[in-house]
Structure formats: C-alpha cells, structure tokens
Amino acid sequence: MKLIYLAGNWHSGSTLLDIYLGNGPDCFSMGELIQISRDGIEKEYCSCHEKIEDCEFWSDVFEEWNSQRSLEDSRFKVIHEKYKLSVRNNVWVIFYHLFPTSEVKTFWEDCQKLYQIIYIKSESEFLVESSKNPLRLMLLKRVFDNENLFVLYLKRNFVGVLESYRKKYEKDLSKGIEKDIQPKKVSKTAFKHLSISYMTYFLKCGLSMVRLRYEEFVGKRGDSEPLTELSEELDIELTSKEKLKPGHLLAGNRLRLKKELKIEKMRSKHSELGQAQISFAKLIEFFSV
Ligand SMILES: [Zn+2]
C-alpha cells in the first residue's frame, strides 16, 4: 500500500490538491483522515453528500475496521488526537515513539489495519491524504514502509495564508464547516506557519518529498513542474479534466461539497490586512522554507 501525504499549513489549498490528484486514474482521495477521532465525525458530510455514517465507502470501511481493530475506541481516540499539532502534543508523540507501550503499539497496528482496509476498498494504487499536519508523519512512518510514503509539501505564501486565517465562519455541517471559526491572532498564525514549514522538512527525513507552491498549482491549473516530477517519479497519471469531481473525501475545506470544481485561486472576500500586517507576513514568508 502506498500513500501520498499532503503536508502544509491550513488554508493552503490542500483539499483542492487532494481532489485534483484523486481525479487521476491511479489515486484515491481520502481527505483529512486525521479527523476520524473528532467527536461527531460520523454526522459530518462526506464529499459524496452523504453523512459519513451513511456513505457507502466510509460506512463499509469503518464496519470492517471495527471488526478487526483491537484497541478500545475511547483509548484509540485519546492517542490519535495526540498526533494533532500542538507544542504539548509534540512532546507526547516523541515520548510514544521513544518509549512505546504495548497500548501504543496496538494503536499503530490498528491504524495500519484502517489504511489497509481503505487501500483494498479504494482499488487504487495510491491513497492521497490531506491531513496537512507534519507531526502525523511520525505515525505514518510506523504504518507505511518509507519507500511507499511520499510527501507533497504544499506551500502557500504567508500573506495569503494570513488573510485566510483572518476570516470568520459559522458552523454549518451541510456546508462542510464543522465548527465556528474565529479570526486567528497574527502572532499565533505566524508561529504555526514557521513550525509547520520546519517540521515538514525535519520529519520528511528518509522519505521522498516534492515541494509545490500553491500559487504555481492554481496559476498553471495543476500543470506545474513539481507535479510533473511527482507523476514521473511515482508513475501516476494526472488528470486533464477541467471540471473535477470530489469522490469520498472525509473532512477538509468546505469546497469538497461542491458537485464539481475547477482549479482556481481561493477568493478573498474582505482583504482586511493592514500594511503593517502585510509587511510582517512577508517577513515570516522570508523565514519559512
Ligand atoms: Zn462518501
């Protein structure tokens, strides 16, 4: 089983890239698998417009997985949530990997069973996951052999990322917004941007990685050099369709719920950044990798 993992900051276009790759004949888009331990995920919408619990793909996957996995669901969720990005979680995950208990090892085995079930059911050569968070690579290295795990680092200019983080959304499951989203503080967003950027480079050690700039991806409608490099290296065919159809993406940006979509730049509704914030964002971008 093989996986293309999309790493990068939030609001960088990873859902669109996931859908784009999944529209090719060799890849299956899974969306943000990292969210399977989120409370109430089964009531959220898959990109096929069914709730996860009713979706023909995911309901079969989870039924099969529940019959095979060993760890109790509540314990699985506790450990799985630790792989979400935060300073405290980083410490937990390092601890798990340095001194794995039998429970943690069972957790890794259960994760592997889940990916195997998805892989078989998808009937595709590659799975694509857009969980973004580089910390998850530590888990994935336990699940996949290094030669079968590929990192596609999607890097968006921090000015665009910051603008997107400043927007506000209200929870609406039917629109694919799973919680109220408040504008984030500039300093926190900058810290996150730099952390993700350096952690991706650090944690991809031992793996093959391609770096793709969001602006190039949308500007060239997918036909960009890093993606050509990826398709040649992995021997996968990229789609030439102009209208993309989301398949069964679990979680991710709300655009996964569109019936079909084109590759285009995310629109900024209200450009609220002041000159000082733009200058700060450019500085952060300069220091990111
Ligand atoms: Zn579905």
Image (spheres, rainbow, N blue to C red):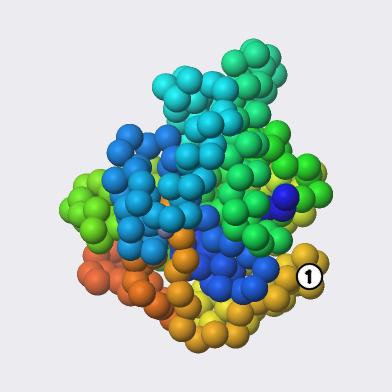
Identified at 63% across, 22% down, the residue is 106
Residue 75, how many percent across, how many down? 47, 20
Identified at 62% across, 74% down, the residue is 24
Between 81 and 168, the residue placed more toward the observer is: 81
Between 72 and 253, the residue placed more toward the observer is: 72
Identified at 43% across, 55% down, the residue is 56
Image: 91 above or below 10: above
Image: 240 above or below 284: below
Q: Residues within 10 Å of mark 1 (few under 14, many from 20)?
A: few
Image quadrant in which the C terminus is located: bottom right
Residue 90, how many percent across, how many down? 54, 28
Residue 227, how many percent across, how many down? 67, 72
Residue 173, how many percent across, how many down? 24, 53
Q: Quadrant of ligand 1?
A: bottom left
Between 25 and 203, the residue placed more toward the observer is: 25
Identified at 78% across, 44% down, the residue is 146
Reading the image, the residue beneath label 1 is: 235
**Quarter of the image where one finds residue 257:** bottom left
- Which element type, helix, strand or loop, lies under badge 1? loop
Would residue 4 be visible to someone looking at this image? no
Asked whether, in this view, residue 172 is left or right of residue 33, the answer is: left
